Each structure stands twice: as C-alpha cells, then as structure tokens.
Amino acid sequence: MSESMRPSRRNFLKTTAVTATALSGVRGARAEEPKAFPALPMRKLGRSGIPVSVLNQGTAFRLTQRMLDFSYAQGTRYFDTADCYEGGGAEREIARWFERTGKRKEIFLVTKCHPTEGPRQMLEMVDARLEALKTNHIDLLFMHQLCDREYPKGAEAWSKSAEYKETAEQLKKSGKCRLVGFSIHHQLRATALENAAAGGAVDAIMFKYDPRTKKNDEMNRAIDRCVKAGIGLIAMKTQSSARAFQSRWEKMKTDDITVQQAVVKAVLSDERLSGMTSHMVSFKMIEDNAAMARDAKPLAAADRELLEGLYASGPHRLCERCGGACADAVGRPTALHDVARFVMYHEVYGQRVRAREHYHGLPAEWVDLSAEELSRAQAACADGLDYPAIFAKARRYFA
C-alpha cells in the first residue's frame, strides 16, 4: 500500500485557506466540500449477520478530523483502530469525531487490545477502550496481533479454549462488545484460523491477506473452515507489497488503474471475505480505494494475471520468510524485525516521524545489541538482511 503518511503542512495550509472546515485536499484547494457518496457496498460479517462496508478505514497513523470526514464522505462506515495506534491518539481522535459529528451509530467501530496473559484479560481491558473512545459499546473487540512476540507460545490455540469462549460470552452479555475475535499476521495464522473454526466461539478474524492467498492451500482450507463455522473474515495488510510492483505494473497494465487499486479489486473478488481494512493515509488513497470498492466491474483478466505474476515474483515485505532464526541466533528478546521495518519506513516511504516514534517506543534492551549479536543475526537471516548496517542507520536516523 501507499505509505505517504499525510498531507504536508504546505498542502494543509493551501487546502484550509478558504475555510477552516473545508474538506478539500484531494487535488488542491477547493471551496466546496467533497462530493458525499452513499455508504460503500456492504457484506454480512459472518454469522452475526451485521452488514459492514467492504472497505474499512484503518487508523495506524497520525489521524485527523479531516481524514475521518473525507473517509466518511467517500462511503466508509467501518473504522478500525487499536489501543496502541499513535499511543492511543487514534482512539481519541475517533472519539472527538463522534462527539463532533454525532455519527457514532452509523459507524461499525473496531478496536483492539493486547491480552498477553490470556483471553480473560480482555475483561479488564475493555473499560479503558470504552473510555478512550467515549462510547458505551464496541462493535468488535480484537485480541491484537495474536502470536506476535509479546504473546506466549501456544497463543494460536487460545481461540478454541474454554477461557476464550467464557470471556467472549461475558463481554457480549455485558453489552460492552457486540462481537469478539482476534487479528493476526503471524506465520501461524492458518493454524489460528483452524483453531477458531474448531472452537466455535470466535465472531470475526482480521488476518494478513493479499492476492497470493487464494493460491495458498493451507490458508484456503483455513478460510473455508472459518466461513463454514460462520466466522466473519476481514483482510488486512492487503496492499503492503504493492508499492514494490508499481513501476512494473505501470509498464504492463491494460486498464487505467494503479496497482494499489488492482489489489483492492483482487482482494474483494474473494467473496469469503466480509471486507478489507486499509490504513488509508492520504485523501487520494481513500478516494482511489473507495472508487474500486464501489466499482462492480471485475479486474480485467490480463491485469489479474499480471498482478498474480508480480506477487509471485516478489519482492515482498521484510522478513516474510523469517521463522525467527535471527532472534534465535541472538538468544534473547530483540527487535530485529521492528528496527528493519522502521528503517524501511524512513528510507522508502518517508515516514520519518512515525518511524522515530515507533523506534523510541521499543524497550532499550531490545535494540541495544552488540556487534557480535548483530553479526549472528545477519548470518541466520533467511533474507540476508545486513543487521549491523541496519542498526547503524537506525541509530543515526532516530537519534
């Protein structure tokens, strides 16, 4: 996906010069508000039967009221946030938007927490999320990034445990949550989906999905079993590789759409999905993605084949083939992948503020690695990442 964080200060001043409330900024300053579209197409979220928009506004960036206004005007009716996005700033910004617009009832609201001690911990965490969002209920509460480093081994089985079932029932009975599930992008996501289908208590899952997923037999079996079990499925990180294919796409495409727009069409063609969440970080990205979500015309066959070929050939996200060998080689908790990712944000996407904030949010002992430890990590890395050089850049960039 496009990683431009937000309009520059210069563009912000240009687009707000006419009136402080104008929602311009898509193609320069305009006095009028942007065209308001009806809600985007809806699909039912699993056995809940709740209709949700097929394109969802992610909020893991420096969110603004104008961004939320524009996303709503483009038809988005599903906001996805988390306790950790912008240090809680995303939730607070959404709360301000609800208070200013009075549109809480029109939005399917999703947030996430990190119950690293087990599902039951969500019972303690939900009130803080309600307070941050200034609402009396959350439509969908996720355990965030299940199976990532902060969770203990075996977390992929939580979704079929009695503890999870009892917790979900209590949360829903209390009226604080309508639905409960988890998000996951870990390599164990197929196993986690299988467990959720077997357990029968998970309402929805958000998981890493891109145009290659349909050709992954293990993931397809897991998706099919979740659908059969009535679990609502939301795709995420769908466009994270697309920027790497942009130049090749522009040379060979047949239709007049960007590679990011082609990904939207390809993902939403999988009717097993209730929708996709995209951290749409610019007005143009919202506009482009929403246009594809409204357009029922399928991706041209030649472009679909081109897109599949680009994803098959790569390159993709950092550390995609990693099984943790680099961390194992160091022998203690580290932030190897995180630091490499933040350096990429800085160099490739120009997200310097975001990268610096995330880097300084890491525990000091996770980034304070010796030259010997970094060399061992480099030797063990399946992608051949030069960790000594990456960490040297991080110390220089984020000082």
Image (cartoon, rainbow, N blue to C red):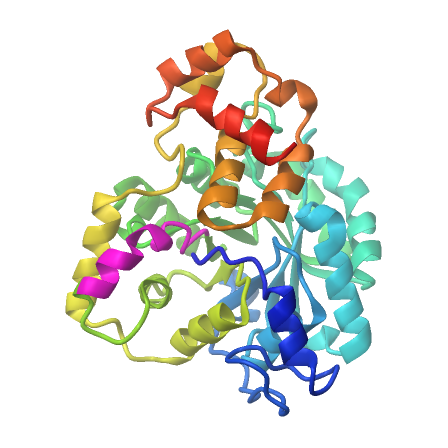
Magenta residue check for 250: yes
The residue at the point 64 percent across, 42 percent down is 165
**Part of the protein shown in magenta:** 237-251
In this rendered view, identify the residue nearer to me: 390 or 339: 390
Identity of the residue furthest to the bottom in this view: 32
**Up/down of 106 relative to 280, above or below:** below
Residue 61 lies within the magenta run:
no
Query: How many numbered circles does the render carry?
Result: 0
Magenta: main secondary structure equals helix
Residue at position x 57%, y 12% in the image: 332
Most foreground residue, 145 or 289: 289
Q: Which residue lies furthest to the top in this view?
A: 372
Query: Foreground: 56 or 200?
Result: 56
**How far across and down, in percent of the image, does residue 29 sit?**
59, 83
For this rendering, which residue is in front, 69 or 158?
A: 69
Q: Where is residue 350 in the image (x, y as percent from the top left)?
A: 51, 50
As drawn, 119 above or below 254: above
Q: Can residue 230 be seen in this view?
A: no
Residue 62 located left or right of residue 283? right
- Quarter of the image where the C terminus is located: top right
Position of residue 339 in the picture relative to residue 258 (left or right):
right
Which residue is found at the position 53% from the left and 46% from the top?
200
Which residue is at a point 69% across and 87% down the rendered structure image?
A: 18
Residue 382: tell me if it is visible.
yes
Quarter holding the N terminus is bottom left
Q: Position of residue 318 (x, y in %)?
A: 40, 36
Query: x, y percentage for residue 64?
Result: 69, 66
Query: In the rendered image of this protein, does residue 271 appear above or below residue 218?
Result: below
